Amino acid sequence: MSDAMGNPSDLVIDFVNTYDVEERTDSIPSPAALTAWLAGRDLIGPGDTADERDLATAADLREALREALRHNHDRPGETGDGHEAELSRPFAALPLRVALTASGPVLEPVATGVPGGLAGIVAAVMGTRSDGMWPRLKVCTESTCQWAFVDSSKNRSRSWCSMKVCGNRTKTRAYRARRQMEPGSRHL
């Protein structure tokens, strides 16, 4: 297994986005798909295969991460999200250990195989926390979207994955709601 942690935030975002809330499609709907996804990111070895339990663990981790990223809108600019409970259960199932390397201490999975690959995602989450990127990882506030993204705005206040799509949808709905509330309005 190679070091898949080139950019930990990219790995976290990529993993959360394996489920498309709007389309209700899952890029990892089966153990075979999970195996392929993890192998494609060098998180598991060539002989490793996922089973149904691994698939359930992956889905649990993914949705706990999505929930935690929702909370990164709560207090932009702060490093702690205050919502660590969402991640405690899936993280406990995927333990890490500190390894001392020539470049310094790193977190690495305790387990091997698919559980180790999923723990590699947990290590990436911890990497985003240690490099200060965690508060910038968010999911779109458009309820039908929930796509994960990195908030690269200067004041960390970005709400939507795309202003052109989700931002426009939200603003259009708000405009229509205001118009309906106007006295004498006949707009539906």
Image (cartoon, rainbow, N blue to C red):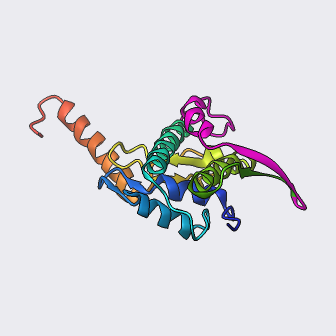
Residue 119 falls inside the magenta stretch: no
Q: Residue furthest left?
A: 186
Quadrant of image for the C terminus:
top left
Q: Residue furthest front?
A: 47
Percent position of residue 145, x then y: 36, 49
Percent position of residue 56, x then y: 44, 45
Q: How many marks?
A: 0
- Residue under the point 66% across and 64% down: 4
Q: Nearer the viewer, residue 108 or 160?
A: 108
Q: Which residues make up the magenta segment?
A: 74-103
Task: Note whether 24 is above or below 63 in the view shown.
Answer: below
Whether residue 158 is visible to the viewer of this picture, yes or no, is: no
Percent position of residue 166, x then y: 36, 52
Q: Residue furthest right?
A: 102
- Residue under the point 20% across and 30% down: 181
Whether residue 171 is visible to the viewer of this picture, yes or no, is: yes
- Residue under the point 12% across and 40% down: 187
Quadrant of image for the N terminus:
bottom right
Q: Is residue 31 left or right of residue 131?
A: left
Residue 100 falls inside the magenta stretch: yes
Percent position of residue 101, x then y: 87, 58
- Residue under the point 60% across and 33% down: 88
Task: Note whether 21 is above or below 186 in the view shown.
Answer: below
Q: Nearer the viewer, residue 179 or 166?
A: 166
